[in-house]
Structure formats: structure tokens, C-alpha cells
């Protein structure tokens, strides 16, 4: 029943045909169980392992590689015996790469399913139910509950514990472990004075919620406003109640979240989308080039070298086309991207951002909107008293007290923003001694004694923590800061320091009993009697809502005694309270009062709460404290950094709108006087808008308050429809669907297992500023990624051009597949990975986020890649041609002989003095491979910066790149000069003259890219190209002089 909260108890019981005192009959239970099913979240239908594995191969680039490997394997099977070993290397290596990628993909898929499984953590195991045929309550498995069942929940389970610190105060101080609510329940009767429930995992509310059994008038109430409902998975903080089950299994609020998680499809990351697009384009280009190479050589299919067999010739050139495909595909790119992202995660971890999904590291770089929770992320989640006032004789107020003396306010500011006994009390900016002011002394007594919470020091975590209610712990901390009994704290351990002043005050009094908080009077009180024989009688210490307390006060406490509370003074106090509760402050206020000479304890009726209000009458108002969950001190700077970086910040919270607006003003999201109309909405206000109005609201809003889980996912959807890249924070079960839906889901380290499982990143310190630091790291990673992609792609273009040229010209193979595989995976892989260590630009957070639709390779970059790639290809083929035609130690054949080498055996007259075996020499392939490797090392240096010259960005700025280039060259020397490797790669050692030619052919790639960078700088920085021509001319003339002096 979805609207049970709006119905009366009688109507709900009638709807389920049940009785509050006797419950359902066994027959009705059986019928309901058949109709609604068991009260549990069904497991997700997970994909079988074989299906997950197959899905990893459903990618265009992977399919091309798989096809190339399969064809290569088939061709290797029919290879001559002497070449069989090397022929199998290529397909086996490619298959190994694909298998590793599939394993990683399957692991990530399995990991994603944990978000749904983690929801089971919040399912209750047992329930106390009333059913016909049994006396009282009976304990059953929670899964057997059905709608209509009458259940009881309480703040005590089978185990209770007494907190070690607070047990010292008085024998009655018990803190109990509350029942976990087993289903969605409509409260029918509260069996204690009050009922408080911690439903933070579902609604995000920072304090426990006071419940009642009355109908809620609004039929569009959000979960936070359904005060007569208990939600499955939440915990009873205090009190006991009875209710009727109105939702089980998937029909509960937590079940609806499970459905949302299952229905939420994670968007592919911007980088993933761009690589997919790149793969599509690359596959088309590869297909066209391969077909072209095969078609160009149709005339050679019947060449005598193929034995006159057209089929053998077709297969031979088909192998060349396959080799071309292998050359064109950057096999090492997935591994290098993964390595770069992994390195980024390590740097982020040092900044307290734990990355769970590698692709999200890069996605952070283009984040345009951060949707942040308020409590614990923007704020400390540690309620703190920041202001308070008492009364004194004076002339400030102007209202006359009953005995003719004017009253004034004594206002104080309190420093310290954490749960810790650290801070000072200031008056007009000056630290004061609270022990000298009787009003402050009495206020401290009320805070310490009218309190059931505490503070403890966690030795493991190394910080102080609250025990009990947040607001009461704030009062405990206030007492420690006030130190009205001048406790000597020097030498105390942190454990004793936690409540030293509170313990001192508590030791002075006997705490007889506590009148618990109730909704009607909005206050609680404690009856205390001094232990020492001071002649004082008992006293009733009261705290509660200021308006409610003020109505029951007859006097005001001043340092000189009690003064009558006049209507004029009351109005002044109400005006003062209004300034505390509104505007920038929006403080949560509590009034402190006392009743002198109350009746003796024996005259109190403690069993009927209806009398409590009468006992708490004739009070003397002592003072008012104002508290809030303070913003983290570094958040305001981070908000400014986001503004400079072009990133919008939207606060989405379950708290009320006024409190959220106040926090937004304090952190600079709203100006001090800024009108928030059209920029701040509650969940209910947002629901009332039309779809177009919602779209506009999301475009301009900075705050959404009192929201439900569905609102967060809806906001993310509107942002995505608008082309924004959103980062969503959350810590509760309610946040999981939105965390999964957003491009970046960010869970809090202190959050629930569900939130963490659905997220891409976890903040170890729950700090908003950590998100901003992670965004900066993401931008740096993307810039570095662009550089190594540029490096790898331009190298691959060179390999493609090389193979295409040799095939088109009819030259002997300059590079074979196993050599290309070695270069792509090993020789290029190391420098590409090292480019991930490039230092970030200094102005990286002063630029707007990049457009997620921006292509990975722009037209200008493609032209640059092509220019470099074409030179790499021509230089590689040119080095082989140089060895054949010009090198004194080579065969010095003619161009015709080189391009018609396949006819050597059938046209001996055209090859007089040239043995046909020379065209199978490993030397030209060694020259081509060496030029390719050295050019790519120089190209790695070019990739230090997209536009900065090597003079401005020298190689030692990235030491790892220098090391990687050195290792790559050592590996290249190893395959040249170690016989076993030389045989595998079909190459041989080079002499000094040959190495000289390799270096001379490789150097121009540096000059060519420096020229392109100069053009790029003139475009992006609006610098004159003419001013750079002298330096460029000098470089090219210097190279020309080198070639003139030392010719090839």
C-alpha cells in the first residue's frame, strides 16, 4: 500500500483486514504469502561466465585483432618448416593480449554486481510479530512477514550495553542497540514516550527522526516527511512501537532502490566512446588499405616466384594485407591506457581518492558538474555549538524587566568545529573565563547533566567520536570548552580529556531521573540533587525548543539573580532567535532553563508523560545555544577552484531547505544577499514542475533539498540529456542508483557498502576538496593520454605507410609481422607508458572542462599524425632501399631490379651479377627496423608536450621517459646482437656506417615536429609565425649541413 502514511490507523487496518491486538490468522498469512511472496530481495539473475567472456570480444578493434590472429594462425600452419616457429609467435601473442583483456573485463563485470548483493546487508533476520493463536509477540524469520502483519520494534535487542565512559555518570545511563526494521511499517501505536529512528541510510538525514502515529496530511510527501512510517533496513534509535506491515520485499523503499540499481545502465566513459569511434574509423581505413594492397598486386599473382599458381600468389599478398592490418592496429594501446590510468589511481590514492573503476580516472578530467551531498562532504558531519547568549543587566535590549531593571544579551562565539574538547569561548572576539559568570556556569550544568550522550577517543582512528545523539554531543563539547569548574587538563590522556569537565560536573550531583523528550512539549529534563551538603535542594534542568521553553518560563537568569520575564523581553528574545535561525546562520537553537525548588522526586508521576509539561513549568530561562553542522574549512576554496575551472557545483541533500541554503552561503555557492529563487528547490517543488521546467531548473539550480532517491537519478538524467558530465556523491543506500547512473559515482569512505559498491571512486576522508584534487589529476591524465595516443598512432601510421609502399612498389618486405608486434608492444610500449608521468600544466585548473564530444583526434592533430607517420614510413622504406641501392657494402642494385625482385629467377638477363638470394638478406630489414625504432624514440621526445618546443620542455622534465627510451634501445640492441633473438626476428648486426645512416635518417622527425609545433603555437597562442622562422631555418640548415658534410 503506497499511501498508507496518509490514512488513519483504522483505515490501514481495515484495508488489510487485520486487528492491531490479535494480528492475522494463519489462513490469511498463507494467502498473503502466496500473493506477495517472501519478504526478501530476490537475487539478480547474473549472466553465466561464458556469456560474460563472449561479451568482452564484442568490440570492433578486438574483432579485427581476433580475425587477424585467426588468419595468421591458419597461414602459419601451412608455413614452411623453417619459418614455422616465428610464424606462430604473432597469432599467439595477439591471442594472449585478447585473453588478458577478457579476464579484466569479466572481473569488472562481476565486481559491478556487488552493489545489488550488498543491499542484503540491510535485510533484517528476525521480526517480532503478533498473530492469532499466540499469546503476545512471537519471533519469526523476517522473510516470512506479509502485508497486514502486526509487528513490534524497539530500541533494545537481545543485547544491550552500557558505554564505558557514561556508565560512570549514573546507573541508569544505558545505550542500546536498536532493532533493524524488517519491512515497511505504518506505525499504529507508540509504546514509549517517544520513538526515534535512524533512517540516514535511506534519506541521508544527519540526525535521528522523531516518529508519531498520526496521518500525514500531504499525499505527495517525501520519505523524510512520512513521520508515521518505518522503512525496512533502518534502525530504531530510541523507543518502542507497534505497527502494521504495508510493504515487503521489492515493494519496500529499499526494494525500489534495488529495482533502480538493476534498471540503471552505466554510461560508457567519454574516453571509451572516443576509442570506440576511433576503432570504427580505424577499421574502415584498415579494410580499405588492405583491399587496395591486395588489388594493386593482382598482376603479380601469377609471377614465377609463386610457381605460376594464381592461388599461391593470392595467398602471399593476402599475408601481406594481414601484416598491414597488424601494423595498423595499436595492439599496445589498451595496455598503455590501463597502465596510465593505474598510475593515476596511485596518485589519487595518496590524495585520499580510492578509484574502483579505472576508466573513471580519465572521465574526471571532463567533469562539468559536481552534484555533492551536504552532510559530511561539504560539512564535517559533526554538530557544533557556534553561538550562544545569556542575559545580563544592561541597556542594550531596552525592554524593562519586571522589577524595573533593563536587560541585555551577553552574546558569545565558540571556536572549534569538530567533536573534540578543543576550542574557546569568545565575547566580542576576546577569550573569556566562563567560571566567573554564574549564568554560563548554570548553562554548562544543564548541558552536562540534561544529556544522555557522550564523547570518546578512538585509539585506533586517532580522533574523538560521538556516542549518542549529535546535538547532545555538541553540548558535551561545549561544556569542555567552557570548563566552568576550572579542571586542570594538563597531563590527561585523550581518553580522559574527552569528558573531563563533564565528569567533574556530573560528580557533583545525583541524577535522580530523566523526563524523556516528547512531541507535544518539545523538551526533556533531568532532576538533580547536589551531592555535597551545600544546603541546596533539588533542581529540574530543562532543554528544548526555544519557543516551547519560552512559553513555560516566568523568569530570566542574570548574574545578579532571577528577573521577571515580561512580554517586551519575550518579544526581544524571539527577535534574537529569528536572527539565529535565518539568513547565513540558520542555526539549530536549543533553550536552556531550570526550575528552582521543584517538588520532591516522590511527587513526580514518571509513568504518564501527560504530566511532564506541568512539571516543566514556572521555569527560569538561562540561555540559548545555536549549533550547526559546520562547513569544512577548505571547502570554500575548493568551490572557488571549481568556479575558475568552469565546473558547476550542485548541492543535493535530504536536509531542509533553510539549513542547506545557509551552508551554501557560508561556502560561497550563494552570495550573502543572493536571491535563491529559481536556484534552490525542494524535492516537492521539483515534482510540481513540468518536464521543460525541470530541465531549466537543473540547468540553473545550485541546491536541491529534501530530495528522495528518485530525484537524484532524475537530476542526473537531465544533466546527461543536456550533455553534461556529472560526478555524483553519496553515502547511503538511497544514493546507489544515482551513483551508478552518473558518469562518476563518488561514495564516502564512511558510507554504506551499497554506495561503495555502486560507485567509481571512494573518498577516504569524505571531503569535497578531495573531489576537486581528483578532477585536477583527471585532467592531467587526459593530457598525458593524448600525448601517448598521438605517439602510438603516428608510429602505427608510419608502419602502415612502410608496408603499403613496399607492396605498392614491389620491393622486398621491409618489416615482417613479428617485428611489428615487437615494436608495437615492447619498444613503443615503454615510452608510451612513461608519457603518463608528464607533469601537468600550471594552468590546468584555469581552463573550462573539455567538451566530452570533442574528438580524440581533431583534424589538425590528424594532419600532424599523417605528416609524422608518412615520414616514418618513407624513412623506414628508404633505409632498406639505401642498403640495396647506395650502400657501398650492399649489392647496389638498380631501382628496376629492386622493384622487380620477384622476377630475378625467371629473368636472369635483367639481374646480371645480382644473386637472387640478396633480396632475402636480413640486413635491409634490420636497417628498416632500426630506423623505425630510433625514429619512434625521437617521436617520444616530441610527445613531451603537444605544442611546447623541446627547448622549453626538455627531456629531463620527465625522467621516466628518458629511462624508458634507454631501456627500449637496450632491448633493440639485444635482439640485434643476441643470436637467438636475431634468428626469431630475422635480423642481423649493423656496422658503424649502417648505424650512421640510421641516425641521419631518423633525426628529421625532431625537426619536422618542431616545425609543426611552431605552427600550432602561432594558432593557439596567437604568436607570429614569422618570429619563429629564423630558429626553424637554423635547425633545418644545420641538418642539411650535416648531410652535406657526412652524406648517406
Image (cartoon, rainbow, N blue to C red):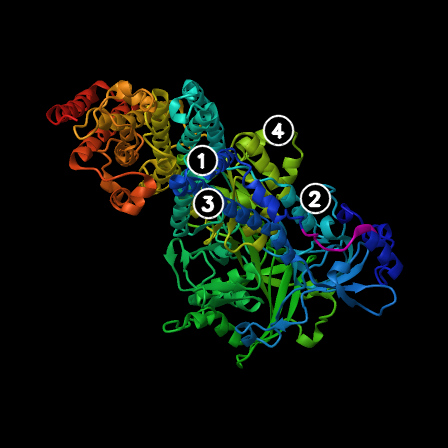
Q: Which residues are magenta?
A: 35-43
Which element carries disc 1, helix, strand or loop? helix
The residue that appears at 43% across and 28% down in the rendered structure is 316
The residue that appears at 38% across and 52% down in the rendered structure is 350
The residue that appears at 58% across and 42% down in the rendered structure is 54
Say which of marks 1 and 2 sits in front: 1
Say which of marks 2 and 3 sits in front: 3
Q: Crowding near pointer 4: few (<14 within 10 Å), some, many (20+)?
A: few
In magenta stretch: residue 1022: no
Say which of marks 3 and 1 sits in front: 3
Residue 221 is tagged as 2
Say if mark 4 contacts mark 2, CB within 8 Å.
Answer: no
Q: Which residue is mark 1?
A: 366
Q: Is residue 1004 visible?
A: no
Say if mark 1 contacts mark 2, CB within 8 Å.
Answer: no
Residue 813 point in image, percent of width and height: 34, 29
What distance separates the C-alpha of mark 2 from that of mark 3?
A: 57 Å
Amino acid at each position: 500500500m503506497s499511501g498508507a502514511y496518509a490514512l488513519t490507523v483504522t483505515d490501514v487496518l481495515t484495508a488489510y483486514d487485520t486487528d492491531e491486538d490479535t494480528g492475522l490468522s494463519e489462513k490469511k498469512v498463507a494467502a498473503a504469502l502466496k500473493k506477495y511472496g517472501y519478504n526478501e530481495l530476490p537475487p539478480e539473475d547474473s549472466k553465466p561466465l561464458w556469456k560474460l567472456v563472449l561479451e568482452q570480444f564484442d568490440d570492433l578493434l578486438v574483432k579485427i585483432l581476433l580475425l587477424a590472429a585467426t588468419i595468421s594462425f591458419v597461414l602459419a600452419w601451412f608455413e614452411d618448416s623453417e619459418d614455422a616457429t616465428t610464424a606462430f609467435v604473432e597469432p599467439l601473442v595477439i591471442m594472449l593480449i585478447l585473453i588478458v583483456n577478457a579476464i579484466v573485463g569479466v572481473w569488472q563485470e562481476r565486481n559491478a554486481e556487488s552493489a545489488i548483493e550488498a543491499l542484503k546487508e540491510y535485510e533484517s533476520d528476525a521480526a517480532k510479530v503478533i498473530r492469532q493463536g499466540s499469546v503476545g509477540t512471537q519471533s519469526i524469520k523476517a522473510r516470512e512477514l506479509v502485508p497486514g502483519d502486526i509487528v513490534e520494534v524497539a530500541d533494545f535487542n537481545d543485547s544491550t550495553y552500557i558505554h564505558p565512559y557514561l556508565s560512570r555518570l549514573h546507573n541508569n545511563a544505558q545505550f542500546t542497540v536498536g532493532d533493524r526494521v524488517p519491512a515497511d511499517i505504518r506505525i499504529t501505536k507508540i509504546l514509549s514516550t517517544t520513538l526515534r529512528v535512524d533512517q540516514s541510510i535511506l534519506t541521508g538525514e544527519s540526525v535521528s527522526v522523531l516518529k508519531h502515529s498520526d496521518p500525514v496530511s500531504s499525499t505527495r510527501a517525501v520519505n523524510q516527511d512520512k513521520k508515521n512510517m518505518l522503512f525496512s533496513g533502518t534502525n530504531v534509535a530510541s523507543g518502542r512501537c507497534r505497527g502494521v506491515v504495508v510493504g515487503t520485499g521489492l515493494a519496500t523503499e529499499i526494494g525500489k532502490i534495488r529495482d533502480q540499481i538493476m534498471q540503471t545502465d552505466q554510461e560508457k566513459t567519454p574516453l571509451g566512446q572516443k576509442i570506440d569511434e576511433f576503432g570504427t574509423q580505424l577499421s574502415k581505413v584498415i579494410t580499405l588499405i588492405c583491399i587496395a594492397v591486395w588489388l594493386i598486386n593482382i598482376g603479380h599473382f601469377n609471377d614465377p616466384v609463386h610457381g605460376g599458381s594464381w592461388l599461391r600468389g593470392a595467398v602471399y599478398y593476402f599475408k601481406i594485407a594481414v601484416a598491414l592490418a597488424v601494423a595498423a592496429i595499436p595492439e599496445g594501446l589498451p595496455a598503455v591506457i590501463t597502465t596510465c590510468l593505474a598510475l593515476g589511481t596511485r596518485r589519487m590514492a595518496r590524495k585520499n581518492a580510492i578509484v574502483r573503476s579505472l576508466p573513471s580516472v580519465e572521465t574526471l578530467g571532463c567533469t562539468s558538474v559536481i552534484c555533492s551531498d551536504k552532510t559530511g562532504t561539504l560539512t564535517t558531519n559533526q554538530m557544533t555549538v557556534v553561538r550562544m547568549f545569556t542575559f545580563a543587566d544592561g541597556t542594550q535590549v531596552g525592554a524593562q524587566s519586571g522589577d524595573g531593571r533593563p536587560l541585555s544579551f551577553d552574546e558569545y562565539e565558540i571556536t572549534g568545529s569538530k567533536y573534540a574538547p578543543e576550542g574557546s569561548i569568545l565575547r566580542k572576539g576576546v577569550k573569556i573565563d566562563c567560571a566567573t559568570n554564574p549564568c554560563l556556569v548554570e548553562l554548562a550544568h544543564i548541558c552536562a547533566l540534561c544529556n544522555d550522550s557522550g564523547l570518546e577517543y578512538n585509539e585506533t582512528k586517532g580522533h574523538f567520536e560521538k556516542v549518542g545523539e549529535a546535538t547532545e554531543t555538541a553540548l558535551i563539547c561545549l561544556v569542555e570548552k567552557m570548563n566552568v569548574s576550572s579542571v586542570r587538563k594538563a597531563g590527561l590522556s585523550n581518553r580522559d580529556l574527552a569528558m573531563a569537565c563533564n565528569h567533574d560536573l556530573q560528580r557533583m550531583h545525583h541524577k535522580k531521573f530523566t523526563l524523556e523528550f516528547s512531541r507535544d512539549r518539545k523538551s526533556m529534563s533531568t532532576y538533580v540533587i547536589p551531592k555535597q551538603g551545600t544546603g541546596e535542594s533539588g533542581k529540574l534542568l530543562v532543554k528544548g525548543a526555544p519557543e516551547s521553553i519560552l512559553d513555560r518560563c516566568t523568569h530570566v537568569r542574570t548574574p545578579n539573580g532571577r528577573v521577571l520575564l515580561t512580554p517586551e523581553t519575550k518579544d526581544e528574545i524571539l527577535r534574537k532567535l529569528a536572527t539565529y535561525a535565518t539568513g547565513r546562520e540558520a542555526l539549530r537553537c536549543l533553550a536552556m532553563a531550570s526550575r528552582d525548588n521543584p517538588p520532591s522526586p516522590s511527587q513526580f508521576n514518571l509513568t504518564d508523560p501527560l504530566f511532564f509539561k506541568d512539571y516543566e513549568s514556572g521555569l527560569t530561562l538561562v540561555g540559548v545555544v545555536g549549533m550547526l553542522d559546520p562547513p569544512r574549512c577548505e571547502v570554500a576554496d575548493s568551490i572557488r577552484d571549481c568556479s575558475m575551472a568552469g565546473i558547476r557545483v550542485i548541492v543535493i541533500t535530504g536536509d531542509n531547505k533553510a539549513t542547506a541554503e545557509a551552508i551554501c552561503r557560508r561556502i560561497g555557492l550563494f552570495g550573502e544577499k543572493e536571491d535563491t529563487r529559481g536556484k534552490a528547490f525542494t524535492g516537492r517543488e521539483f515534482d510540481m514542475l513540468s518536464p521543460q521546467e525541470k530541465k531549466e531548473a537543473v540547468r540553473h539550480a545550485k541546491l536541491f533539498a529534501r530530495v528522495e532517491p528518485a530525484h537524484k537519478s532524475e537530476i542526473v538524467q537531465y544533466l546527461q540529456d543536456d550533455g553534461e558530465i556529472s560526478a555524483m556523491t553519496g553515502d547511503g543506500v538511497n544514493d546507489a542508483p544515482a551513483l551508478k547512473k552518473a558518469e562518476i559515482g563518488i561514495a564516502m569512505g564512511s558510507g554504506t557498502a551499497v554506495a561503495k559498491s555502486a560507485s567509481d571512486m571512494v573518498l577516504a576522508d569524505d571531503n569535497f576538496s578531495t573531489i576537486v584534487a581528483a578532477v585536477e589529476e583527471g585532467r592531467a591524465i587526459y593530457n598525458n593520454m593524448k600525448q601517448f595516443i598521438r605517439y602510438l598512432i603516428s608510429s602505427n601510421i608510419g608502419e602502415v605507410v612502410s608496408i603499403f609502399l613496399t607492396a605498392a612498389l614491389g620491393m622486398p618486405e621491409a618489416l615482417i609481422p613479428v617485428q611489428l608486434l615487437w615494436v608495437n608492444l615492447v619498444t613503443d610500449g615503454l615510452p608510451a607508458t612513461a608519457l603518463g608521468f608528464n607533469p601537468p600544466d600550471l594552468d590546468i585548473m584555469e581552463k573550462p572542462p573539455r567538451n566530452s564530444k570533442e574528438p580524440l583526434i581533431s583534424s589538425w592533430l590528424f594532419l600532424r599524425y599523417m605528416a609524422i607517420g608518412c615520414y616514418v614510413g618513407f624513412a623506414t622504406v628508404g633505409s632498406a632501399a639505401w642498403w640495396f641501392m647506395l650502400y657501398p657494402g650492399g649489392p647496389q642494385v638498380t631501382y628496376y631490379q629492386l622493384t622487380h625482385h620477384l622476377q630475378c629467377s625467371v629473368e636472369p638477363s635483367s639481374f646480371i651479377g645480382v644473386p637472387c638470394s640478396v633480396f632475402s638478406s636480413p640486413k635491409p630489414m634490420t636497417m628498416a627496423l632500426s630506423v623505425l625504432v630510433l625514429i619512434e624514440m625521437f617521436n617520444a621526445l616530441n610527445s613531451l608536450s603537444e605544442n611546447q618546443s623541446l627547448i622549453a620542455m626538455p627531456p629531463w622534465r620527465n625522467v621516466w621517459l628518458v629511462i624508458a627510451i634507454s631501456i627500449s634501445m637496450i632491448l633493440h640492441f639485444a635482439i640485434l646482437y643476441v643470436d637467438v633473438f636475431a634468428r626469431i626476428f630475422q635480423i642481423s648486426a649493423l656496422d658503424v656506417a649502417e648505424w650512421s645512416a640510421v641516425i641521419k635518417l631518423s633525426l628529421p622527425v625532431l625537426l619536422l615536429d618542431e616545425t609543426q609545433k611552431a605552427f600550432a603555437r602561432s594558432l593557439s597562442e596567437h604568436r607570429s609565425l614569422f618570429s619563429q622562422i629564423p630558429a626553424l631555418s637554423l635547425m633545418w640548415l644545420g641538418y642539411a649541413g650535416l648531410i652535406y658534410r657526412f652524406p648517406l
